[in-house]
Amino acid sequence: MAGVREEARTQKEPKGTESVRPWLFTVGDSGIPSYWALLMIGFCAAFYVAWRESRHDGVDPNRMLDLSLLMLLAGIVGARLMHVLVEDDPLHPGRPILYYYLEHPGDIFKLWNGLAFYGGFLLAAPLGLWFAKAKGLGVAKVADIAAIAIPVGLVFGRLGCFMAGCCHGKPTDLPWGVTFTDPMSLARPLGVALHPTQLYSSIFALILFFLLFIQKRRWRVFEGQVFLTFCLLYSAGRFLIELVRNDNRGTWFNGYLSSSQLIALPVVLVSLFLLVWFGKRAPKIKTSTR
């Protein structure tokens, strides 16, 4: 995920063009980025799902909200760090964005300029599990709740990416290709139909939510299974979507793997191993259809 950098905002959109809106509105040099507006809606929706599921599962909902806030803060910090340290500059292809932040260190704190999901997940997940254990909430039970709340946030977060033009796909001749024309958009190249990978990700997250919700209600065999299934399916889906992404998000091994694919591969393998391991050894539970 990424935002819109200041230098992109200074450009004007040609009259007569139709485009997705990177900014909901602007007043002088200030405004409300569409990305952050949708991301905040996503956070609120994820909080609500976590709160509702905690009541269903007998977890203190107030503690769950505390945990959600902690994971939100940790997620933003981790996502920002990965963006700053790993990704390439979307406005200067082939150049690590870290160089830009070394030249403009104050911009590191401009969170709207870019976030990376896996960075947030890798910091928020262990911190959240530690908090759950420290407060006696039940680590596996809380992890399963988080597993169906996170995709809800991603649905809106990726719609925000679509509005900003970040996380865009490769050029395509498919009929559902999307053409970005707004110069403030981070999509490149402008005026060319691109794979709407942001929408692929949003739809995938919505499907993932329903699958995991049903699993939690009807198919769950042991606590923690839903979380491990989320890690497995999200990482596998993310790896595939990355194949048609074309934004400058950092690549490895001469461009064969993106940073997200490099993370997704071990997550898939570890999640699959743990699903089999705990499936044989963890205490079995009765699912609820309520």
Image (cartoon, rainbow, N blue to C red):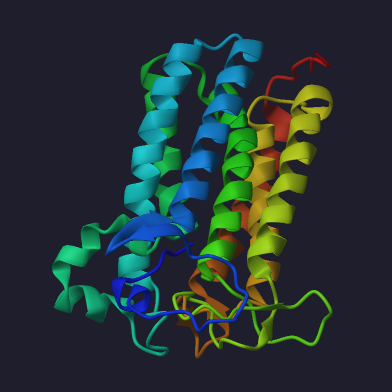
Q: In the rendered image, which quarter is residue 268 located in? A: bottom right
Q: Is residue 111 left or right of residue 196?
A: left
Residue 84, percent from left and from top: 31, 67
Position of 100 relative to 136 (above/below): below
Q: Is residue 195 left or right of residue 183?
A: right
Q: Considering the image in quadrants, where does the C terminus appear?
A: top right
Q: Residue at x 59, y 56 (%)?
A: 158
Q: Is residue 80 left or right of residue 168?
A: left
Residue 173, percent from left and from top: 79, 87
Position of 228 relative to 18 (above/below): above
Q: Nearer the viewer, residue 208 or 127?
A: 208
Q: Nearer the viewer, residue 272 or 65?
A: 65
Residue 248, percent from left and from top: 47, 80
Q: Residue at x 63, y 77 (%)?
A: 169
Q: How many marks?
A: 0
Q: In the rendered image, which quarter is residue 162 located in? A: bottom right
Q: Is residue 104 left or right of residue 226?
A: left
Q: Nearer the viewer, residue 222 or 6?
A: 6
Q: Residue at x 37, y 88 (%)?
A: 92
Residue 134, percent from left and from top: 36, 19
Q: Residue at x 30, y 78 (%)?
A: 7
